[in-house]
């Protein structure tokens, strides 16, 4: 069983590990907004192509 100093050491180690996970986003506000908009545009294109494929397959039936 973990006792005393070892428990404290493990707690400190886990805190450092958790802090690294939180700081994963390194984009600034404008960079984040631009990435968000470009991702949204990509998804719109994918959705449009999927809708086009769906309507073309509906016409064939």
Image (cartoon, rainbow, N blue to C red):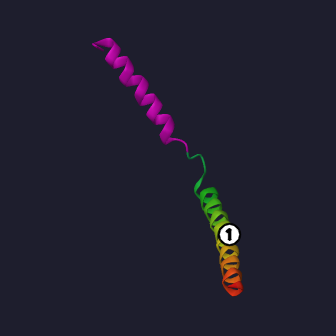
Judged from the image, the secondary structure of the residue bearing numbered disc 1 is: helix
Which range is magenta?
1-24
- Residues 46 and 17: in front is 46
Residue 39 placement (x, y as % from top left): 64, 63
- How would you rate the neighbour count of disc 1 (Cα within 10 Å): few for under 14, some for 14-19, many for 20 or more? few
Report which quarter residue 34 is drawn in. Answer: bottom right
Report which quarter residue 12 is drawn in. Answer: top left
Q: Main secondary structure of the magenta part?
A: helix
Judge whether residue 57 is colored magenta: no
Q: State the count of labels.
A: 1
Q: Residue furthest front?
A: 61
Rendered residue at 71%/82% (across/down):
56
- Residues 1 and 17: in front is 1
Residue 36 placement (x, y as % from top left): 61, 62
Residue 7 placement (x, y as % from top left): 32, 18
Rendered residue at 64%/59% (across/down):
35
Q: Quadrant of the C terminus?
A: bottom right
Residue 45, compared with residue 5, is above or below; it is below
Rendered residue at 70%/77% (across/down):
53
Q: Is residue 21 left or right of residue 27?
A: left
Mark 1 highlights which residue? 46
- Residues 42 and 60: in front is 60
- Residues 51 and 32: in front is 51
Residue 16 placement (x, y as % from top left): 45, 29
Residue 1, compared with residue 44, is above or below; it is above
Q: Is residue 7 left or right of residue 44?
A: left
Q: Quadrant of the N terminus?
A: top left
């Amino acid at each position: 069983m973990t006792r005393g100093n070892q428990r404290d050491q493990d707690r400190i180690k886990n805190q450092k590990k958790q802090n690294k996970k939180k700081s994963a986003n390194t984009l600034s506000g404008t960079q984040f907004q631009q990435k968000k908009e470009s991702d949204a545009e990509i998804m719109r294109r994918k959705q449009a192509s999927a809708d086009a494929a769906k309507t073309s397959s509906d016409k064939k039936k």
